[in-house]
Amino acid sequence: MANNVAVSYEQLINWLRLIDESLIEQRAYLTELDAAIGDGDHGTNLARGGTASSAKVDAEQPEYIDDLFTLVGMTLVGTVGGASGPLYGTFFLRFATSVGHRQELTPGQLAEALEAGLGGIVDRGKPDLGDKTIYDAMEPAVRAFRAGIQAGDVASAARAAADAAATGRDATADLVARKGRASYLGDRSLGHIDPGAASTALMFDALATALA
């Protein structure tokens, strides 16, 4: 896909469906990660949110990208418990605000929307790199996507973002948690991948698949 080719509504709705499918398929894995350092409900909560958001999209069939992502964001905030619902919900709501009322995006507009979503995560959770959170996978992924579209095509940029998210996810095993429930464990959080970073990696892998 050339760098000047627009990203379509169909590709973006496919991204969301792939996220939902991944969350449902990986529910046990995410819950296992969370059981080690958190409440043990990350996978269950996100799978519930994925099921609910897919149902909402099917029922309402929004025509524009901002309406689509607003619907998903609001559904996640309303159905996913713990910290992950507000965080991911805010990500998609900020994404929606950034894109405006349109049915396709330029690669640059998609990069701006991802950056806006990341900004929502920062505003809500106040994370820093190294805190052992969602942010450790999301920040390098969003940065890699921006660098990728400046250097090449959007499909390669999305794959670079997915690779960066996976690297960030894996690196959380070597971190001591500084935020959230895992931070109560201190050094005992070492050796465990952060579940939020793992679900973020799934999200960007889904984006790479949708834009391939």
Image: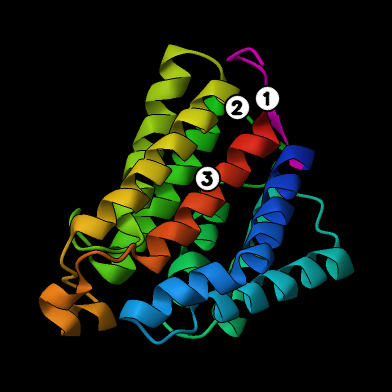
Depth order, front residue of 17/121: 17
Foreground label between 1 and 3: 3
For the C terminus, the quadrant is top right
Magenta stretch: dominant secondary structure: loop
**How far apart are the alpha carbons under marks 3 and 2?**
18 Å
| Label 1 with label 2: CB-CB less than 8 Å | yes
**Residue denoted by label 3:** 204
Task: Answer with the quarter of the image where residue 115 lies.
Answer: top left
For the N terminus, the quadrant is top right
| Residue 83 can be seen in this image | no
Foreground label between 3 and 2: 3
Which range of residues does the magenta coloring cover?
1-9
**How far apart are the alpha carbons under marks 1 and 2?**
5 Å
Amino acid type at image mark 2: Thr
At 57% from the left and 23% from the top, the residue drawn is 154
**Residue denoted by label 2:** 106
Q: Is residue 6 magenta?
A: yes
Amino acid type at image mark 1: Ala
Within 10 angstroms of label 3, few (less than 14), some, or many (20 or more) residues? many
Within 10 angstroms of label 1, few (less than 14), some, or many (20 or more) residues? some
Q: Is residue 8 magenta?
A: yes
Describe residue 153's horizontal placement relative to residue 90 as left or right: right
Q: Which mark is residue 6?
A: 1
| Residue 19 in the image, given as x and y percentages of width and height | 64, 56
Instruction: Say whether disc 1 or disc 2 marks the residue closer to the N-terminus.
Output: 1
Is 43 above or below relative to 100? Answer: below
